[in-house]
Amino acid sequence: MRILIINFEYPPLGGGGAVATAHIAELLAQRHTVHVITSGYADLPADNVEAGVAVHRVPVWGRRDKPTASLRSLISFVPTALRRGRQLCRREQFDVLNAQFAVPSGVPAAVLAALYRVPFVLSFIGGDVYDPTKGTSPHRHASLRWLIRRLAGAAAARTAISADTARRARDLLGVREPITVTHLGIFPFTCQPTDRSQLGLPAGAFLFVTIGRLIPRKRCDLLLSVLREISGAHLVIIGTGPLAEQLKQKAAAAGVADRVYFLGYLSEGRKQQVLCAADAYISGAEHEGFGLVFLEAMQAGLPITTAGEGGQADFLTHEVNALLVPPHDAAALAAAARRLMADADLRERMGQENMRRVRNYYWTRTVRVFEQVLQEAARHGKR
């Protein structure tokens, strides 16, 4: 197949959704011709081949940093992506188009599909359906709900990264067409013995780790409140974002700055080393459309405590491989964290179950389901 993927974010821009798109594109490129249209930034090349994928970066306005997109950059992506897409569609004769994120990516994808009579697949990623921390979240606005319903109706097929995301697209946005759940995945890695001192981490302390962009939805401030209630625990925060300095100030104000380690952006290898050196994974995120970070923690054999709502419910089961608590509940999260600290047998049992369960979510397996949706759309068009 000849595939065009449109996503306003692609590494090094964005978060988990961008990284997932890159992995999908690179795996598909092993068997198909794949092009990606995404946002430009600073001195990133306008056209480049990356891991077999032809990446086309178009101008956007108002993007201030790599981790987060501004509303202005999202809006300006639509016309520039459409312009580049018309050039590529005329030249490449694509078999299928894919929009990663219903908005804004779905708009140029739908227009291109109509202009060039190419089927397109609309992929719901989470924040394009529901983000409880954003006033611009589509579920809050009738105009965006209407637009996404129109896009979903025009698509040859629709996918969602989790059952939670699919349910919210139906219940909150009113999408009535069938939605296929196509999970994201990870690449397996093996933990090696790691000296914490080489990572700048305390050797004898109980170490929680969390990964994510430092944005309101991830609720790292909740983790600082939890840490204040638990003596002896230390917390590693991996990720960058606009709240970094604010969180450091909050850690100091809470009296836990000496037990919090802000590591910023880490390479994949370094991130895996830190995961393997930790004792447990903790997340205060208000909502995750899927939760790739949980799969990474599972691969490292870590027990997990987090909120029980979101895409992670597809693979995290309370008392089996995680301790799940209500969202926003710092007291419940602190109690779960204390329980993990106190019970080595529980940590071992959950860690082993996570290492067993995560095998179902390796990219080589999950991308096949997504590939089948694209192939069926290319063969049969709108369904």
Image (tube, rainbow, N blue to C red):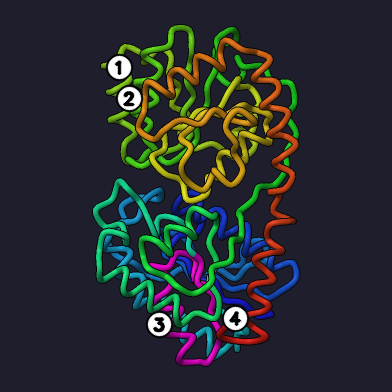
Q: Are marks 2 and 3 in contact (CB under 8 Å)?
A: no
Q: Are marks 3 and 4 in contact (CB under 8 Å)?
A: no
First in sequence: mark 3 vs mark 1: 3
Q: Residues within 10 Å of mark 4 (few under 14, many from 20)?
A: many
Q: Amino acid at mark 1?
A: Ala
Residue holding disc 3 = 83
Q: Amino acid at mark 2?
A: Lys
Q: Residues within 10 Å of mark 1 (few under 14, many from 20)?
A: some
Q: Residue 315 occupies which quadrant of the picture?
A: top right
First in sequence: mark 4 vs mark 1: 4
Pick the front one: 226 or 30:
226
| Magenta residues, start to end | 98-123
Q: Residue 295 occupies which quadrant of the picture?
A: top right
Residue holding disc 4 = 96
Given this view, does label 4 or label 1 mark the residue nearer the observer?
4
**SS at circle 4:** strand
Residue holding disc 1 = 252
Q: Amino acid at mark 3?
A: Arg
Given this view, does label 2 or label 4 mark the residue nearer the observer?
4
At 52% from the left edge and 26% from the top edge, which residue is drawn? 209
Residue holding disc 2 = 248
Q: Amino acid at mark 4?
A: Val
**339 with respect to 172 (left or right):** right
